[in-house]
Amino acid sequence: MHQYTTDMYEGMLAETVMVQGYKGDAINAYFARPLGPGPFPGVVLIPHMPGWDEWYRETTRKFAHHGYLSLSPNIYFRFGHGSPDDVAAKARGSGGVADDSAVGDAEGCLRLLKSLALSNKKVGVFGTCSSGRQAFLSACRLKGFDAAVDCWGGRVVMSKEELTPQRPVSPIEYTKDLSCPLLGLFGEEDENPNPQQVQLLEQELKKYGKKYEFHMYPKAGHGFFYYDRPGYRQEQAVDGWKKLFAFLEEYLGTAT
Amino acid sequence: MCTGIVETAEVSGSGKGPRGWFKLEQVNVSYDHPSDAPLENALNIDFVNQREGPGARVAVELSPESARKLVKAILTALSQTVTAVSEASDRT
């Protein structure tokens, strides 16, 4: 956990950059990093379904404040530009971001972060809601991530009827390929994923001997970190953030 | 796309967005997280013209109960229109 004291110098650079994403496409991304020579651990923040929005930019800066090279790709880039909610709505009406595309964009960010001279060569992946699912998928389908955080990712467990051309495989099927430790934060009152689905994923992780840490919060539902939504739960969110940064510190290290 | 519940239909008509009126081509109806309505999931209706970009959108986010009221109101209005049209046809 970043120990902030009032006598410390602190600086951050946050800006939009271009990265090579899925199929080599140049897409924009929001990059926030602490000032200083590093080396710093890195985190890829895949944006959630409401879009590449203000909450994700704030969260990207939050990770930078805690000492991470933080990169959030605009996985909605291919749907055009406009306000984040308009672009996300266009994606939703077109069947959503394809899993291959989201994973490809995460891979591009992973490569970029690991290539930086500022990097300690440890990179994690973080996502909430639909991007919690995509973070899990990325950690399974890609080699190179050192930690993954899935916050209430819905539809990691999918029925055959739920599969679509954009999402042709239920992510739980990839569990055997999970390539790094996984942190999962969930709410007991969530319907998507519900506690039974989280349990199924946990059974699968145990079956394949994967390193994971799950926390199921009582009196919380979906999206309990989102301070601007009715599902925000202060106590659970504060504890969740603590657990999240402790987990990342364990597997990614801290800035030296 | 947390729930994945989306239905789409081709429509014709006009919608008024932030840049004024535009031709509608499609309506997307989803039950998923709203952007603004204080609900975990809402019945979201987006009237769009995909060719004019993401901004060509008239959006509403309704509670399920409100959505049902809307459906009922539309069907009631349409049934009166059908009656009026058929009555007009009968007179001619």
Image: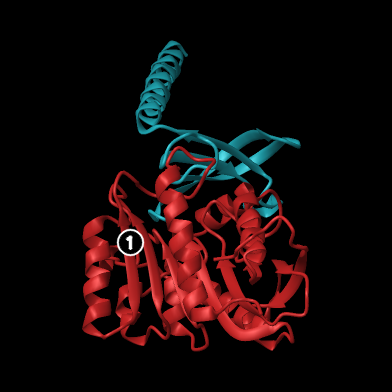
Chain colours: A red, B cyan
Residue B44 place in picture, x, y as percent: 47, 40
Residue A84 place in picture, x, y as percent: 64, 51
| Quadrant of residue A37 within the rendered picture | bottom right
**Whether residue A14 is situated above or below residue B51 in the rendered picture:** below
| Quadrant of residue B85 within the rendered picture | top left
Report if residue A128 is visible in the image.
Answer: yes
Q: In the image, A116: left or right of A62? A: right
**Whether residue A251 is situated above or below residue A29 in the rendered picture:** below
Q: In the image, A82: left or right of B64? A: right
Report if residue A223 is visible in the image.
Answer: no
| Pick the front one: B21 or B30 | B30
| Pick the front one: A184 or A196 | A184
Q: Which chain is home to disc 1?
A: A
Image quarter hosting the C terminus of chain A: bottom right
| Pick the front one: A91 or A12 | A12
| Quadrant of residue A158 within the rendered picture | bottom left
Residue B75 place in picture, x, y as percent: 38, 25
**Whether residue A208 is situated above or below residue B65 in the rendered picture:** below
Query: Crowdedness of circle 1 by 10 Å Cα count: few (<14), some, many (20+)?
Result: some
| Pick the front one: A182 or B79 | A182
Q: Please name the residue shown 34% across and 46% down the image.
A: A220
Residue A211 place in picture, x, y as percent: 34, 81
Q: In the image, A145: left or right of B19? A: left
Name the residue furthest front. Answer: A7
Q: Please name the residue shown 35% across and 73% down the image.
A: A171
Q: Please name the residue shown 30% across and 78% down the image.
A: A173
Disc 1: which residue = A215
Q: Secondary structure at mark 1?
A: strand
For the image shown, how many numbered marks are present on the structure? 1
Q: Amino acid at mark 1?
A: His
Name the residue furthest top. Answer: B91
Image quarter hosting the N terminus of chain A: bottom right
